Amino acid sequence: MKTKIVTLFIFICFLWSLLIFRAGYLQFIPHDKLNTLQARQFQTVVTLPARRGNIYDKNGKELAMSSPSYSLYADPKILKDKKKVASELAKITGLSNREIMLKIADGNRRFVWLDRLIDATAAEKIRQMKVKGLGLVEDWKRVYPNDSLLGSTLGFVGKEGQALEGIELYHDQSLRGQQKKVVTRRDARGRPLVQDGLLFTENPQGKEMRLTIDSELQYFVEAEMMRTIREHDADGGWAVVLDAKTSAIRAIASLPTYDPNNPQNASSFARRNRAVTDTFEPGSTLKTFVIAQAIDEKKIKPNTKIFCENGAFRIGKRVIHEAEADHAQGTITVSEVLARSSNIGTAKIALQMGDDKLKRGLLSFGFGDRCGVDLPGEAKGITVRLPWSDHLLANVSFGQGITVTPLQLANAYAAIANGGMLKRPYIVESITDVETGEVQITQPQDIRRVISEDTAAKMRLMLTGVTGETGTAVAARVPGYIVGGKTGTAQKIKTVGKGYQKGAYIGSFSGFIPANDPQFVIFVGIDYPKKNGYYGTQVAAPLFSKIASYAVRKNGINPEILAENGREIQNASVQVARQADPLADKAINIDGNGAKTVTAELSPVAPYLKTLTMREVLKITGQQKIQVKFVGNGRVESTYPEQGQQLDNDRNMTIILR
């Protein structure tokens, strides 16, 4: 009996030894199969969306940013007292009881999103409820701190983080960054472990983007254009401001616009960046390129005389007229054809060139093709196939039978302003990889030379005649600066069917400032103005003047004052004399016979500062070494001396603020 007990004891000890050895082996000796099973049971891989990169303007001001927010989820299977939970959540989230109950009613479901992108205050209230079965996930909400500013250009992001329109869509891959996959432990139910109801994760960072946009200029453009739209009871408007040297976009606007923080409240029309996606007949603004091409082809010269048929020019069975009967002209020069916007004079120049050369010239300036701007949905515009009848050729020469986008037209004027080189417009200045610090800078890009530098110089001077005393755009002038540009008035094409809308017009102006050394190219167009006129000279030229005035003053571009007996002169002949004269820094007087004499050096004059802030005033006056004294608070209401008047020897100015 004793032997049996000892044998049994030894056997049991042996079994325990085997079990202990096996346990030790499993515990301390690596085993790939068991490790895999353990990882599969107690670990899970969670994909973390990247925090979307911020978007800034050229001066570093935030245009789009990602702010912390939270998303609420539920496990309906373990959720108790669902009616009470739904009632409390409805008070916090703004969702209805019914909406929440529909999501959590099914007790067999293990996961359901209840609300996305809720703020920190609401998240804290949900945490304090301490309800088992509710959880919060850290998320990022896209915020546009300037509300509707640049709305149609920036675009927006949906609740699921998907980019839907604008820059957000075009540069989505860079902004959203790369998703990261992280391994985290999970409980027996297979859910990621949370702490205090929040799944803590470290989100990766998307790339940051700096635009060429000047947000202060953008705000001014949108505000002034909205005033113009209201004044003329217009359907809307477009504006594009380009850097004349590089074609970088400094401002771009389509009104009416929308607030990208609440895109659900906006129509598709308001969300569309119509300065890029929509086309229109350019009207007389196209005459500039017809004449430029003819001069470059040496078909004409600025002083070539053309008989304008006294206002009625017959081509076959049809008769071409000027826009107004009192615009009828006899024999005038090519420069006057442009300044007075003669349809007949431009048509005769186009007929001399022929349809093939004219179309090649227009295509060379970028019409009929996309500019290649880094924005989605860019339209090409329409150019009719060759051959063109003489009547169609004449119509195209003054902007009918061809459609362009506002950006195309502005960029074509930039080619004249910069010396004849068509450049690719762009809106992204740089992209920064936050994690590596790598910066990708956009360089200005030449597309092709369209006209010679000499032709471009002649065209700039001729376009200053448009804003001269006998030109069509006196309202586009900017005190203290010489402006070049061209008005346009075109019938509005029907959106459904063929032909034009009865009584509907688009008034526009394209130009540059200052004419002797252009820094900005500006296009403005007003869509279907119904009150106080519809011509480009009535609705668009004054708006151009306001925008151009603000742009040059804000950027500290010195005015160039030419005076005769204390009166400001702004015409092409004086500017020709200044550019040709080696003593261009001297004052120029023009006598009755046009003779030019050189007198003493120009004394410093008071810059145009009206409506600027104190900071902007100090920037401009500091560059010109002007001593200023401020009276009051706010923006500049008036100055002493007034703009354009000579300063004393100590360069003193008094600034009245309001």
Image (tube, rainbow, N blue to C red):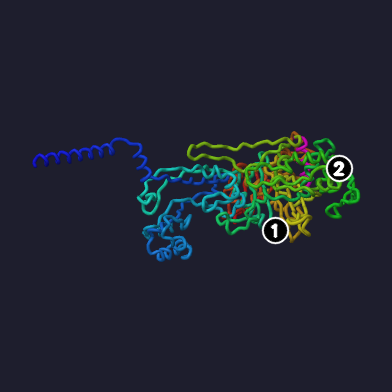
Place of residue 360 in the rendered image (x, y in percent of width and height, measured from the top left): 78, 39
Q: Please name the residue shown 71% across and 36% down the image.
A: 421
Place of residue 8 in the rendered image (x, y in percent of width and height, measured from the top left): 15, 41
Instruction: Specify the label residue 563 is tagged with.
Output: none
- Residue 549 against residue 233 in the figure, above or below: above
Q: Please name the residue shown 62% across and 52% down the image.
A: 152
Region rendered in magenta: 453-466
> Is the magenta region chiefly helix, strand or loop?
helix
Quadrant in the picture for residue 60: top right
Instruction: Specify the label residue 235 is tagged with.
Output: 1
The answer to if 214 sits in the magenta stretch is no
Which of the image's four quarters has the C terminus?
Answer: bottom right
Q: Is residue 487 visible?
A: no
Q: Nearer the viewer, residue 605 or 514?
A: 514
Q: Nearer the viewer, residue 36 or 209?
A: 36
The answer to if 464 sits in the magenta stretch is yes
Q: Is residue 605 visible?
A: yes
State the SS at label 1: loop
Q: CA distance from mark 2 to mark 1?
A: 36 Å
Q: Nearer the viewer, residue 608 or 124?
A: 124
Quadrant in the picture for residue 45: top left
Under mark 2, the amino acid is: Leu
Under mark 1, the amino acid is: Asp
The answer to whether 104 appears left or right of 445 in the picture is left
State the SS at label 2: helix
Q: Residue beneath label 2, please?
A: 351
